Image (cartoon, rainbow, N blue to C red):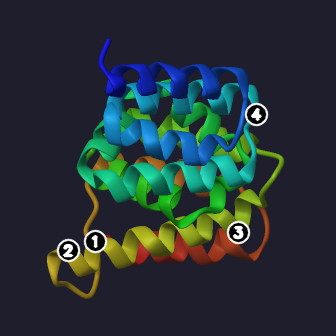
Amino acid sequence: MTPKTQRKYELIASIAHGDGNAVANLAQLCEIDFTTAFDMFELALGKTNTLELARDGLAVFEAASPTKTRQLFAESGPIQKLLYSSPAVGDKRLINFFVGFVLSNKIEIADECLMRMKANAFVDFNENLRVIIDALFATYCKEKGVIVPAFNKKQKTLLIEYINKIKGPNKALLLQRMKEIG
């Protein structure tokens, strides 16, 4: 067994048993085997879904490879479930992942994420949805070089469905914004 392989297994065991600093161990494992590190991130989140682990763990993966991170995140229902149900749900990275799902027409994944956010007791879904829609509009306009976004029917239907589930002043504001885009 090579020293690199031995270190990989030591890190896996350490993360699995909750020994040491999970984020630091994930960072080291990420350098050796990105996919295995992502799997261990899922395991660690399942055991102790803390704000630090969720936020800082994602940062480790994005620093190593933003493209691989987005791909594995989109393919991992358990990671999405854990993160969108966690205290980190308002984190900019999770909002950006969600925006990416909507803009790339991964409506089923976006719907699951919104469902988990709505059920999340750690955040105010009304305010979080406003922040998400602001980010969605801003990202679309920046990417397309336009002033007003233009969403397709599935995207608008999804957003309006969840806007209708909130109460308070954000509901009227967000519904008006959706009407303004067509």
Q: Nearer the viewer, mark 4 or mark 3?
A: 4
Q: Which residue is mark 1?
A: 140
The residue type indicated by label 2 comes to Glu
List x then y, in percent, for residue 174. Answer: 57, 72
Q: Is residue 10 left or right of residue 65?
A: right
For the residue labelled by badge 4, is the local secondary structure a helix, a strand or a loop? loop
* Earlier sequence position, callout 2 versus callout 3: 3
Q: Quadrant of the C terminus?
A: bottom left
Q: Disc 1 and disc 3: Cα gap in Å?
A: 20 Å
Q: Nearer the viewer, mark 4 or mark 2?
A: 4
List x then y, in percent, for residue 40. Answer: 52, 27
Q: Are marks 4 and 3 in contact (CB under 8 Å)?
A: no
Q: Are marks 4 and 1 in contact (CB under 8 Å)?
A: no
Q: Quadrant of the N terminus?
A: top left
Q: Which residue is mark 4?
A: 48
Question: In this view, which residue lies farthest toward the right?
Answer: 121
Q: Disc 2 and disc 3: Cα gap in Å?
A: 24 Å
Camera-nearest residue between 61 and 3? 3
Q: Which residue is mark 2?
A: 143
Residue 156 seen in this snapshot:
no
Camera-nearest residue between 173 and 17? 17
Q: Residues within 10 Å of mark 2 (few under 14, many from 20)?
A: few
Camera-nearest residue between 180 and 36? 36
Residue 37 seen in this snapshot:
yes
* Earlier sequence position, callout 1 versus callout 3: 3
List x then y, in percent, for residue 130. Answer: 60, 70
The residue type indicated by label 4 comes to Thr
Q: Disc 4 and disc 3: Cα gap in Å?
A: 26 Å
Q: Which residue is mark 3?
A: 127
For the residue labelled by badge 1, is the local secondary structure a helix, a strand or a loop? helix
Q: Are marks 1 and 2 in contact (CB under 8 Å)?
A: yes
* Earlier sequence position, callout 4 versus callout 1: 4
